[in-house]
Image (spheres, grey):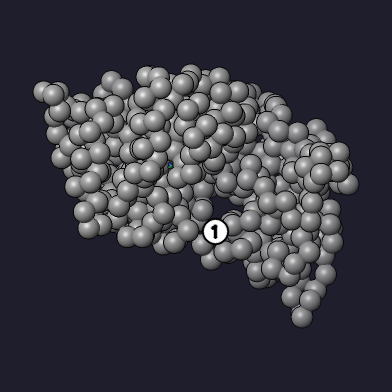
Amino acid sequence: MTHVNTAAAERRERILRAAVHQGLLAPDRADLAAFLDLDGVAASVTALHEAFPDPPGVLHTFAAKANCLVPVLRELRTLGMGCEVAGAGELAQALAAGFAPDRIVFDSPAKTRSELARALELGVAVNADNFQELDRIDEILALRPSASRIGVRVNPQVGGGDIAETSTATATSKFGIALDDEGSRRRLLDAYRARPWLTWVHAHVGSQGCPLELIAEGIARAVAFADEVGPTHGRRQVRGVDVGGGLPVNFGDDETVPGFDAYVRCVRSRVPRLFGGRYRLVTEFGRSLLAKNGFTAARVEYTKTSGGRPVAITHAGAQVAARTVFTPSSWPLRISAHGPDGSRRAGEPVPQDIAGPCCFAGDLLARARPLPLLAPGDIVCLLDTGAYYASTPFHYNSLPDPAVHGVRVDAHGGITFEPLRRAETLEDVLARTGG
Ligand SMILES: *Cc1c(COP(=O)(O)O)cnc(C)c1O
């Protein structure tokens, strides 16, 4: 484990030094930038594919909200992934990245009529969230047939994990059709029987903070429901189960635990028949594919002490790490300290506050974090931020979105960067603020 940690830390340090050397992190010009290790992404996708036995017809989709940058989606497509989207914006991004419509899955609790019509016209798979949405789909299909695979998101009501905001299968969750509410299962079974085109069942139990056993239990209940639909007109109606995503990520060190193999072992032991070839499968992982392959680097602009505690004011705060800043106990991040050239800082750890640039007191990435004492011009790296961080900005104080760079390391250790998103200019900021 130490070995894993050392290798990963050394790789990041080499990438950071190269980034400084190549001017991607330059004081006053580029004080904040995010990096995504594309070799690491490829390895994560391979681990996902290898973890699943290969019954024909497993479609692994990437949840676009975890990192919606079009070049990232394009990279994932070339690695063999499909794409899960939740809205017209993400659908446009997926199409721009070149995903074939039948490799896109559209989930959202608030699909508009026109979004539904477009998805059904394109042949994008759709998971309906509620009974009213099914009525809308009826109306659209009455006008023209669709090649889309259509399912319903069920809420297996297995309860929540450690983080309420990312637990989607609680008794009162806003998502899907609650299976155990009075009369609900009966009504849903009737809805399936009345609609022979409803051929999929979808469940996404939750994301970070949900233990594997909870996810497996949710999937088991969704599969039991699929079995319950039974055959209509002599053939099995439900052809596939979309099991969602949600494999939790270890933000504590560089180990990738649990892995996709542990996920499959856990689900398989709880629901063996899911892998028996009876159902086609879709998965929708986001965070677990990307989080550990990214980091965000920020310059330290100033340092001082306040109430006796050292404070480093950096250029990374709520604008790139909203969840960490607003709910630090649920979303703590590791931070590494580097000198101006990117080399790791040595020195006695001193408890320091690592602050961001936003004008509110709580804009802290870490409180009293023991790190070598930082100085102006140093760099801090927020680790494991490849998903749901720089790609999901928060536009407080009109701070511009930073550049995101893809990174590849060749067999000789040569490091190349490629743009995944350029930094916003002041013109961009004005444009999005009505200027
Ligand atoms: C967010 C989401 C996912 C991905 O969750 P991760 O925790 O990033 O794996 C998958 N499916 C649905 C419906 C989602 O909302």
Looking at the image, which is closer to me, 95 or 38? 95
Residue drawn at (39%, 30%) of the image: 139
What quarter of the picture does the C terminus occupy?
Answer: top right
Residue drawn at (47%, 28%) of the image: 117
Q: Position of residue 416 (x, y in %)?
A: 70, 26
Residue at the outermost bottom position: 307
Which residue is labeled 1 in the image?
331
Looking at the picture, does residue 16 appear above or below residue 234? below
Residue drawn at (45%, 45%) of the image: 109
Tell me if I can see residue 295 in this picture.
Answer: no
Which corner quadrant of the image does residue 7 belong to?
Answer: top right
Left or right: 310 as drawn, with respect to 64 = right
The amino acid sitting under disc 1 is: Trp
- Quadrant assignment for ligand 1: top left
Looking at the image, which is closer to me, 371 or 98? 98
Residue drawn at (24%, 51%) of the image: 184
Left or right: 87 as drawn, with respect to 345 = left
| Count of marks overlaid on the render | 1
Tell me if I can see residue 323 in this picture.
Answer: yes
Looking at the picture, does residue 51 appear above or below residue 370? above
Looking at the image, which is closer to me, 8 or 100? 100
Q: Tell me if mark 1 has few (under 14), some (14-19) or many (20+) residues whose alpha carbon lies within 10 angstroms of its own.
A: some
Which corner quadrant of the image does residue 39 belong to?
Answer: top right
Left or right: 77 as drawn, with respect to 343 = left
Q: Position of residue 55 (x, y in %)?
A: 26, 24
